[in-house]
Image (cartoon, rainbow, N blue to C red):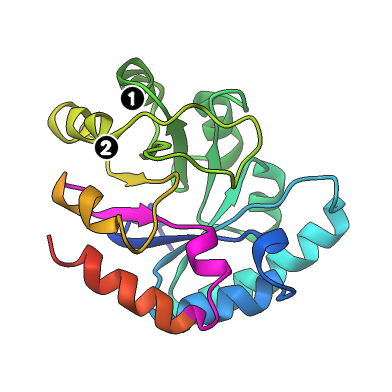
Amino acid sequence: MRQVKPQFPEGIYGITAEKFSRGRSNIEVVRAMIAGGIRIIQYREKRPPKDFAAMLAECYAIRALTREAGVLLIINDYPSLALLVDADGVHVGQDDLPVPEVRRLLGPHKLIGLSTHAPEQARAAVAAGADYIGVGPIFSTQTKEDVTEPVGLGYIDHVVSNCPLPFTVLGGIKEHNLAQVVARGAQSACLVTEIVEADDICAKVQRLQKILQKK
């Protein structure tokens, strides 16, 4: 059967972040995200504290959940994990493996996302063959260590006007400021702690989706 590369979906882009999940496992969080209507989930964990065996076991379990629900699974940073669990793609940063090398590993039918923080990086992502880009951090964020300074709403304007790739905005986005990025043309947004720290993840995602759909 001929493989077809999946399309990058609009809506909330979910990311796992177990250290912020208030004692809930990544698997529990993903199940709740799916129940809330998220159509794409990125598995993001670092080693340490987790070793590859633990990450692989989680990815197999999450792959089973996402496949049953028809949800895309993206693996952050680790093409090897993506290949082993047959994920839908990989997301990399500016200092990770270059997009062309990831493409050599994954082949033509997987999604490759690239984090970008400036117009020149967005242009380079197109040239390198990325399928979508991350745009941010829009606002200040403490979710990631050694994070880039906020790029502001103006970078969304640039990407909307000049970049042909689909994109997701991220970095410090919360329920109270999500409408600001939607007004700039964002059709996909990633909120990490706002979702994984929520008392009711499913209900939180549903509220966020309604804001994002008012474009």
Can the viewer see residue 4 in this picture?
no
From what the image shows, is residue 169 above or below residue 71?
A: above
Q: Is 169 positioned to the left or the right of 31 in the image?
A: left
* Magenta residue span: 185-201
- Residue 136 lies, in percent from the top left, at 40, 36
Q: Is 84 positioned to the left or the right of 54 in the image?
A: left
Q: Where the N terminus falls, by quadrant?
A: bottom left
From what the image shows, is residue 7 above or below residue 59?
A: above
From what the image shows, is residue 49 above or below residue 56?
A: above
Q: Nearer the viewer, mark 2 or mark 1?
A: 1
From what the image shows, is residue 60 above or below residue 206?
A: above
Q: Is 45 positioned to the left or the right of 167 in the image?
A: right
Can the viewer see residue 81 in this picture?
yes
Q: Residue furthest top?
A: 120
Q: Where the C terminus falls, by quadrant?
A: bottom left
Which residue occupies the foreground of this view, 161 or 87?
A: 161
Q: How many marks?
A: 2
Residue at (77, 59) in percent of width and height: 56
Q: How many neighbours does mark 2 have within 10 angstroms: few (below 14), some (14-19), or many (20 or more)?
A: some
Residue at (29, 71) in percent of width and height: 209
Between disc 2 and disc 1, whose residue precedes?
1
Residue 172: mark: none
Report which residue position mark 2 lands on: 165
Q: Secondary structure at mark 2?
A: loop
Q: CA distance from mark 2 to mark 1?
A: 9 Å
The reply to whether callout 2 and callout 1 are in contact (CB within 8 Å) is yes
Amino acid beneath label 1: Ala
- Residue 128 lies, in percent from the top left, at 41, 22
Report which residue position mark 1 lands on: 122
Q: Secondary structure at mark 1?
A: helix
